Amino acid sequence: MKTIINTKFAKKILFAALAIVSVQGFSQEEEEKPKFTFSGSVDAYYRSNITAPNGEEAIAPGSSFANLDGFALGMANVIGSYEGEKVGFVADLVFGPRGTDAIFASPMYSATGDIVNQLYVYWNVSDAVTLTFGNFNTFLGYEVISPVANFNYSTSYLFSYGPFSHTGLKADFDLGNDWSAMLAVMNPTDLTELNGTGDYAVGAQLGYSGQFLNLLYSQGGFEIDYTGGFDLSEEFFLGINAAHFTQEDDGGSFTGVALYPQYKTSDTFTIGLRGEYFTTSDGFDNVAGIGAFGDDDDGSVLAITLTGSATIGDLILKPEIRLDSASEDVFIDNDREATGSLASVLFAAIYSF
């Protein structure tokens, strides 16, 4: 018996199959198409001393950022990035006091200061190797320049004493089974526009499952840094940062450890504490807050920072109270007398996009 074929039905099946193939091909093209993204943040804050004067005589902890008096500006952070199949770039620009502090050693070609926080290109050589060339934020430490990525709004002494950014070439390696590694050759620490010294820094990192051991050698100084954290439960996270730096020529050094317990009370609110102990020896890089002990003296500080973090859509609100207690009388009290402690409060608003 001869088989009868319904040609209209067959055409419908063929057209449907072609449509499916076309949609799949279009989807693959969409997935492989390079994409440009635009993101960033804006932040401002209010800060006031409790145990010390405000106004013209206002003092602040000897750590970076969030040290201005009264209502103050953080920065506008604008990031443009282009992600191709193999290559891409990141242009990260900053405007405002926090941004200026972050690139303190960079402004050399502009009377108003540089605005480049990061500027680099990258090449995904393979699934396991990525090369990055240009200016990138440091790989050391728990905290970063962007207030969006930090839980506490004010920053630690460990962060403030460590490098902020590097310019050079680094290679990141995915070793599999949650292991990673990084090697880098760079300009001396924080010289991000050009070298200017003829010296170079080298860096390395070994990572496993969110825990990182970092090494940096720059201009006779060697730093070893551990950064990591653990989810102790669905609500409770503990971050950890510890570092030691030694300068070969004069023997000056610093050592610090900070713990970051954070408890998530709801989908929109988390409360966290930063407890940090930081010490310098041989008068290393004295700054207000823990320094000014003299060339041969040691100094230390215990800093406790309690921060709340509430999210309202893309807006983050952070009330914070901070207590700094130094080994020497490097602060002043409300009677303008020297004292070893300082209590302050701040309230920050951060919008990310």
Image (tube, grey):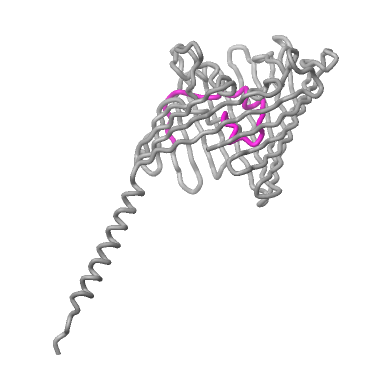
Point out the residue furthest to the front here.
8
> How far across and down, in percent of the image, does residue 83 sit?
39, 39
Position of 235 compared to 88: left or right? right
- In the image, 25 versus 13, the foreground residue is 13
Residue 348 found in image quarter: top right
Q: Residue at coordinates 49% horizontally, 10% vertically from top-left?
A: 111
Determine if residue 226 is in view: no
Considering depth in this image, is 24 or 204 the residue closer to the camera? 24
- On the rendered image, what quadrant is the N terminus found in? bottom left
Q: Quadrant of residue 260?
A: top right
- Above or below, 302 against 194 in this view is below
Which residue, as the protein is rendered here, is positioned at the far bottom?
Answer: 1
- Left or right of 7? Residue 36 is right
Span highlighted in magenta in the image? 144-172
Q: Quadrant of residue 215?
A: top right
Above or below, 337 relative to 352: above
- Residue 158: in magenta span: yes
